[in-house]
Structure formats: structure tokens, C-alpha cells
Amino acid sequence: MTFNGTLEELQALVADLGCLGHWVHEGAFEMLVIEDGESNLRLNWWPGTGTLMLVGDPAQRRELEPRLKEALAGGS
């Protein structure tokens, strides 16, 4: 997945999906630590390349990943 906008635009996009958490700057990438009380999901974004990577429990990723891809494609 890729996202080539600004951090603020990405933050708004994931907030619209109901992803609550906090953002952490990790050197070359930005990371959203999702705080839903039941998963260990993280969304990593490298602004230089636009690469987005959702990491964490596969069962939890399967629920969020299609919604994120749809939003990135402009479908939400």
C-alpha cells in the first residue's frame, strides 16, 4: 500500500476509519499505534516513499486492511 499525501491527511483518513491511537515519529517513518483495547496493530508510513505497512496480529489486520485499501483508493 502507498500514500503520497501529508501526515495530516493520513491522520484524517485513518481517523475516518475509526482507528484510534497515537502517532509516533520513528526516524524515517511515522507510526500509528492503534489503541482499540484488543489488538497490537501498528500502521507504519514512510513519507519519503509513501509506503504504508500494517503490522500486528494477522486476524486483526484482515479486518482493517481491506477498509484501509478502499479508503486509500478513494472509496470511502
Image (cartoon, grey):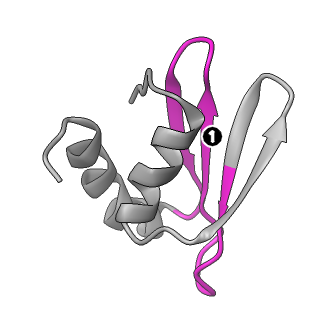
Q: Farthest left residue? A: 75
Which residue is at 70% across, 45% downward?
31
Residue 20 picture location, percent across and down: 56, 72
Is 56 rendered above or below residue 54?
A: below
SS at circle 1:
strand
Left or right side of 23 for 55: left
Q: Which residue is mark 1?
A: 44
Nearest the eye: 44 or 5: 5
Tell me the residue at 51%/20% (across/down): 50
Q: Quadrant of the rendered structure where residue 60 is?
A: bottom left
Task: Give the residue furthest to the front.
Answer: 8
**In this picture, is 62 found above or below 12?**
below
Q: How far from the left and from the top, in percent, is residue 49?
A: 55, 12
Residue 31 as seen in the image, left or right of residue 51: right
Q: Point out the stretch of residues depicted in magenta.
A: 32-57
Label 1 Cα neighbours within 10 Å, binned few <14 / some 14-19 / many ≥20? many
Location of residue 4 by image quarter: top left
Magenta stretch holds residue 44 = yes
Task: State how many labels appear.
Answer: 1
Query: At 42% from the left edge and 27% from the top edge, which residue is drawn?
Result: 3
Q: Position of residue 41 (x, y in %)?
A: 60, 62
Residue drawn at (51%, 33%), measured in percent from left and top?
Answer: 52
